[in-house]
């Protein structure tokens, strides 16, 4: 029983690490784009295959899909799973999402760059 619990915890940690890395990549990419476009809302996709490759999972059960969408919701980011395409559609709105302090500074600098180049 102890081995099963350790394995479950390991899988959850893998999922959390995968989600944190994906979310950070989405935020960083969005902020880079702000400096050039001024847009604050961007859409991304995570395929089931990418989740499986990144976490070692064989399948995405409904409970895992729910955990993934809840992770994004906890960061004020919209995410829905599309079963037809086996992927998550993720919409990042930089006006509303949760940012780390370093990301917030990066966003402020990107917004200032856009303003300086477009005024």
Image (tube, helix red, strand yellow):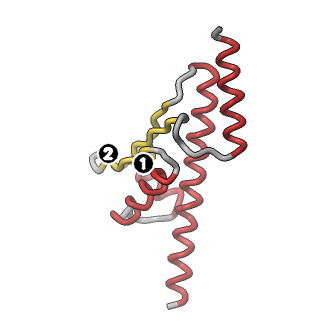
- From this viewpoint, which residue is outermost toward the front? 96
Crowd tier of the residue under label 2, counting other residues whose Cα lies within 10 Å: few below 14, some 14–19, many 20 or above: few
Residue 37 against residue 53 in the figure, above or below: above
Residue 47 has which mark?
1
Q: Name the residue under label 2.
A: 85
Q: Is residue 91 above or below residue 110?
A: below
Label 2–label 1 contact, CB within 8 A: yes
Q: Circle 2 — which element?
A: loop
Query: Taking 88 as reference, is 94 left or right?
Result: right
Q: List x then y, in percent, for residue 112.
A: 69, 22
Residue at 38% in and 59% down: 65
Q: Residue at x 68, y 12 (%)?
A: 117
Q: Position of residue 59 (x, y in %)?
A: 38, 64
Q: Position of residue 33 (x, y in %)?
A: 59, 26
Residue 119: quarter of image:
top right
Q: Which residue is drawn at 60% across and 43% down?
A: 25
- In the picture as drawn, the residue positioned furthest to the bottom comes out as 1
């Amino acid at each position: 029983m102890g081995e099963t619990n350790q394995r479950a915890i390991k899988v959850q940690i893998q999922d959390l690490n995968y989600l944190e890395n994906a979310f950070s990549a989405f935020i960083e990419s969005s902020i880079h784009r702000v400096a050039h476009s001024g847009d604050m809302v961007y859409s991304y996709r995570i395929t089931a295959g990418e989740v499986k490759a990144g976490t070692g999972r064989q399948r995405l059960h409904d409970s895992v899909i729910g955990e993934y969408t809840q992770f994004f919701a906890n960061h004020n980011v919209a995410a829905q799973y599309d079963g037809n395409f086996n992927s998550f559609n993720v919409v990042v709105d930089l006006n509303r999402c949760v940012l780390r302090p370093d990301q917030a500074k990066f966003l402020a600098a990107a917004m200032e760059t856009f303003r300086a180049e477009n005024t």
